[in-house]
């Protein structure tokens, strides 16, 4: 299964500045493994210590947030596009 | 001493103020792209209420005290930014019934992986106050930009002198 993964600007130093890379795997978790095998360092940025996708990392399969699909186990097909999008977020001071 | 300037024209400043007022009492958010000559305002949806409803333990705050730009909109705007060569000039959000400052959370969320997510983009914060009868911008917005030498976000100045 060959899938295009869109890399966000902050992570492109790990992919030799490539905005998109092609990786193999039939679900999100395997894609991330393959991504990390080719571009070491990506996995630790996506996962927390318990191997869950970090709160501030959004992953989309085509137009769907994988949180609303099957998370890391979401299956992917040839020609799918996966996007990694770190959140732009914040909040006021709470006393 | 504020040592950097963010040029923004009056039209853009008015539009982001209006956005802050219309989303009050919730935080508004958006992105300004620029090709160097012209700025392009992209108002975004704050998805914080959705996040809070779906998962209140991970997201204890709702949109009155926090924001997250709709990631799908963010993705589209990033694609536009690259396809049309319009880098992200600034992100903006509002502080309902609070002053303009860069909070610990604002800073932490902008500095994940121990470095700034978008070191070349500034963060504009719009203070917006109000009650049932009236919503207003009571004081100036403030801008924070990553300073490479200091390794932190510092306040910069808005320059609207060119219109
Ligand atoms: Zn804020």
Image (cartoon, rainbow, N blue to C red):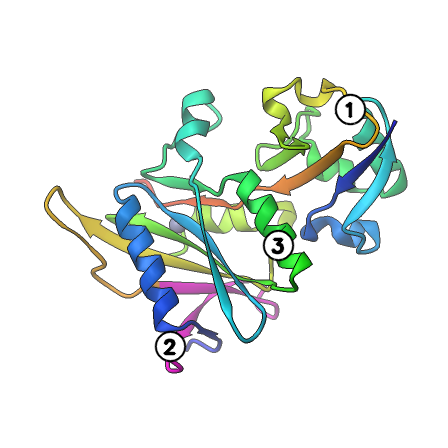
Magenta stretch, overall SS: strand
Residue A58 rendering spot, x and y as whole percentages: 61, 35
To which residue does mark 3 refer?
Answer: B80
To which residue does mark 2 refer?
Answer: B160
* B156 magenta-colored: yes
- Image quadrant in which the N terminus of chain B is located: bottom left
* B147 magenta-colored: yes
Q: Chain of mark 1?
A: A
Q: Secondary structure at mark 2?
A: loop
Q: Chain of mark 2?
A: B
To which residue does mark 1 refer?
Answer: A76
Q: Residue at x 73, y 18 (%)?
A: A73
Q: Secondary structure at mark 1?
A: loop
Q: How busy is the neighbourhood of tag 2: few (under 14 within 10 Å), some, or many (20 plus)?
A: some
Q: Chain of mark 3?
A: B
Q: Nearer the viewer, residue B110 or B151?
A: B110
Between tags 2 and 1, which lies in front? 1
Q: Do the residues indicated by labels 1 and 3 lie within the same chain of the protein?
A: no
Q: CA distance from mark 1 to mark 3?
A: 25 Å
Q: Do the residues indicated by labels 2 and 1 lie within the same chain of the protein?
A: no
């Amino acid at each position: 299964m060959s899938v295009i993964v869109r890399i966000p600007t902050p992570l492109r130093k790990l992919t030799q500045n490539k905005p998109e890379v092609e990786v193999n795997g039939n679900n999100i978790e395997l894609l991330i493994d393959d991504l990390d095998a080719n571009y070491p360092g990506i996995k630790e940025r996506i996962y927390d210590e318990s191997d869950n996708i970090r709160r501030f990392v959004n992953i989309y399969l085509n137009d769907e947030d994988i949180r609303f699909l099957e998370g890391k186990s979401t299956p992917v097909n040839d020609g799918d596009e996966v996007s990694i999008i770190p959140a732009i977020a914040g909040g006021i001071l709470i006393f | 001493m504020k040592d950097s300037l963010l040029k923004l024209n009056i039209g853009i400043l008015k539009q982001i103020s209006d956005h802050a007022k219309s989303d009050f009492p919730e935080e508004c958010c958006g992105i300004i792209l620029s090709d160097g000559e012209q700025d392009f305002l992209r108002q975004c949806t704050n998805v914080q209420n959705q996040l809070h409803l779906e998962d209140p333990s991970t997201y204890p705050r709702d949109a009155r005290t926090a924001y997250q730009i709709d990631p799908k909109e963010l993705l589209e705007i990033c694609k536009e930014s690259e396809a049309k060569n319009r880098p992200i000039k600034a992100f903006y959000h509002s502080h309902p019934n609070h002053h303009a400052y860069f909070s610990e959370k604002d800073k932490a969320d902008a500095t994940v992986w121990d470095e700034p997510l978008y070191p070349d983009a500034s963060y504009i914060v719009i203070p917006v106050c109000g009650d049932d009868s009236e919503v207003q911008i009571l004081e100036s917005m403030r801008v924070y930009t990553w300073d490479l030498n200091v390794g932190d976000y510092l306040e910069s100045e808005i320059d609207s002198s060119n219109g």
